[in-house]
Image (cartoon, grey):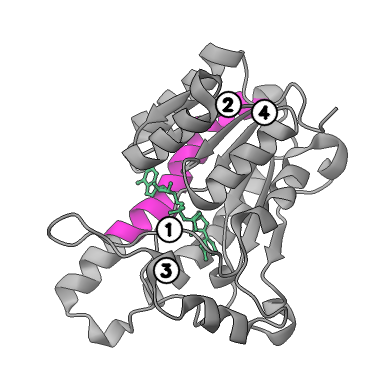
Amino acid sequence: MGCLENYVVVVTGGGTGIGLAVVDKYLTEGAQVVVLQRGQKGIDALRRSYGDSVPVVQGDVTNYRDNERVVQAALDHFGKLDVFVANAGVYDFFKPFEDMPASELEKTYNYIFDINVKGNLYGAHAAASALRASKGSLIFSASSSSFYAGGGGAVYVASKHALVGLVKQLAFELAPDVRVNAVAPGGTNTPLGGVPDSEGNTQRLDAVPGFADMVAKTVPLGFLSEPHHHTAIYTLLACREQSGFMTGAIIPSDGGLVVRGG
Ligand code: NAD
């Protein structure tokens, strides 16, 4: 029996990358999972793999009502909510901030902070009362950029540092009912996207030339991680028996960046 048997979980951005790997791992551990997904590709991927067994709410984390809808979907389908994984995020592709004209800086800030900070805050708020009722937990996808410079540009790094504050304050405010923790992955092979251009297209991290080599050269373990390298930590943080005394923790999964100080 998996340690998440009878758990009901929401994962935002669960149709691709780390979120999709977490969905897969949680299902293996026995959980029922509901996903909030924005893009059609991710929705199609979930349908192909899991059919109707994983209900998907199409929506945007920056819209408070969409966060409420996915929490309600978990309650309607499965009767409760044990874990809310606030995972959706976007990237700034480490563009030096002096290279951006003010208008681009503002657009980048608004787009990235809206999703990485406000979206996570909204998700946590929308889930809080259901999580208090189940004595559940909140898990955020932080980043090595929550601690160190150089893994993103100023906007992304600041947005992921902001999550550290969110984890601490929510762990404080929601105790003793709800545990609040985060996973902080380092460079991972995913289609993490950025600010859309005027045609709505974005860069993807897994298409950046040399990204794998850059990560491999930077981290002591010497390779670019895959999403599955992080998923057992999400399980640990969800599972009451295994991490019932942990709150306010941010666990690195970064190939050893931590011992180099970034
Ligand atoms: P990804 O693009 O595969 O996953 C991000 C998901 O968030 C996607 O499914 C995307 O559709 C969704 N999303 C984006 N904006 C959204 C919005 N407004 N509303 C709803 N969903 C939205 O990339 P990933 O790397 O798996 O990213 C998952 C998380 O991990 C992010 O928070 C990212 O910052 C973090 N992270 C990634 C890396 C990395 O190197 N890939 C490293 C550290 C942390």
Which secondary structure type mostly characterizes the magenta part of the structure?
helix
In the rendered structure, the answer to whether residue 241 lies left or right of residue 101 reads right
In the picture, residue 143 is in which quadrant?
bottom right
Q: What is the CA distance from the residue labelled 4 to the residue labelled 3?
A: 29 Å
Disc 4 target residue: 82
Residue found 60% across the figure and 15% down from its top: 78
Image coordinates of residue 115 in percent, x first then y, are 38, 52
In the rendered structure, the answer to whether residue 7 lies left or right of residue 39 reads right
Residues rendered magenta in the picture: 111-132
> Quick check: can you spot residue 60?
no
Q: What is the CA distance from the residue labelled 3 to the residue labelled 1?
A: 16 Å
Residue 191: numbered disc:
1
Residue 127 drawn in magenta: yes
Disc 3 target residue: 156
Question: What amino acid is labelled 4 in the image?
Answer: Asp
Q: Nearer the viewer, residue 237 or 38?
A: 38
The verdict on label 1 being within 8 Å of ligand 1 is: yes
Q: What is the CA distance from the residue labelled 2 to the residue labelled 3?
A: 29 Å
> Given contact means CB atoms under 8 Å apart, are the residues at marks 4 and 1 in contact?
no
Image coordinates of residue 246 in percent, x first then y, are 80, 49
Residue 129: numbered disc:
2
Q: Nearer the viewer, residue 157 or 128?
A: 157
First of labels 2, 1 by sequence position: 2
The verdict on label 3 being within 8 Å of ligand 1 is: yes
Q: What is the CA distance from the residue labelled 2 to the residue labelled 4?
A: 11 Å
Mark 3 burial class by Cα count in 10 Å: few <14, some 14-19, many 20+ = many
Residue 249 drawn above or below residue 258: above
Q: Nearer the viewer, residue 15 or 156?
A: 15
